[in-house]
Amino acid sequence: MSWVVILALAAVAFVLGAVVLRLDRSGWALFGAALLFGLTGYALQGSPELPAQPAIAAAQSNDAGARMVAARRQFFDAGRMPSNWVVTADAFARRGDYEEAAQFYRAAVENDSNDTEGWIALGLALIQHADGNVTPPALYALKQARAIAPANGAAQYFLGLASLQGGDVARAREYWADALAQAPGNAEWREAVQLQYQMLQQTTGQTPPLR
């Protein structure tokens, strides 16, 4: 699938979600993440003759909380479940109760300060609870995850999305470039983020090298 087709599909789908379906502005970044992960996954491994994958269908649902959880899980081993605290919190997040979810995510990191997914989940829930704004507590949570597992990429990726939502394209490029620079070559999420980074470069007409 060519870049033009991918970008066109992403643009149409985003407009439908943001304008026609009237998604809340706070959910735009996560909606965009779900779209790009789905489209890049298709571009990299697409097989039109096969049925659609359930994960993609779930990511395109209208539930911002479910999209948040699905987008986060892309950065972690699907065969390894998160802690019970995170699993419980995810149930609240899927219902849009980010305040209650944040309490359980916070308990997860208090129980295990090295719980990378717990820190990421906490940061995202706090961002959603603040209507898409990266508050100091949310930034702290994501930076904790980054410090614990710099090769994971989730913290930098979602900070990049938040930067895009705020209109800071240059900062988004920096975050995504850093995520890719630190990522192991065999990271399952690497190709999707690489493709999104390149899309961002093409749409802005700038092609600085990855660090």
Image (tube, rainbow, N blue to C red):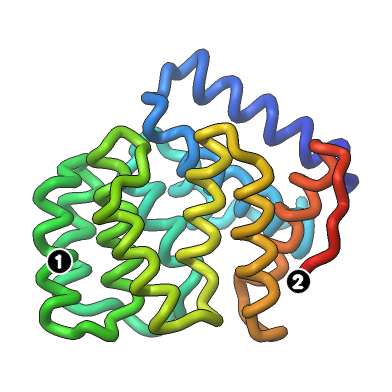
- Which mark, by number, is residue 31? none
The answer to whether residue 54 shows anywhere in this view is no
Q: Position of residue 56 (x, y in %)?
A: 54, 51
**Circle 2 residue:** 211
Task: Specify the amino acid type for callout 2.
Answer: Arg
Q: Position of residue 119 (x, y in %)?
A: 29, 69
Residue extending farthest to the top is 20
The residue located at (66%, 57%) in the rendering is 174
Q: Position of residue 180 (x, y in %)?
A: 68, 71
Query: Quadrant location of residue 157?
Result: bottom right
Q: Which sits earlier in the primary sequence, circle 2 or circle 1? A: 1
Q: In this view, does 118 lie above or below 33?
A: below
Task: Specify the amino acid type for callout 1.
Answer: Arg
The residue located at (23%, 40%) in the rendering is 129
The residue located at (51%, 34%) in the rendering is 166
Check disc 2 and report its element: helix, strand or loop. Answer: loop
The residue located at (23%, 58%) in the rendering is 90
Q: Which of 41 and 169 is in front in this view?
A: 169
**Circle 1 residue:** 106
Left or right of 4 in this view: 23: left
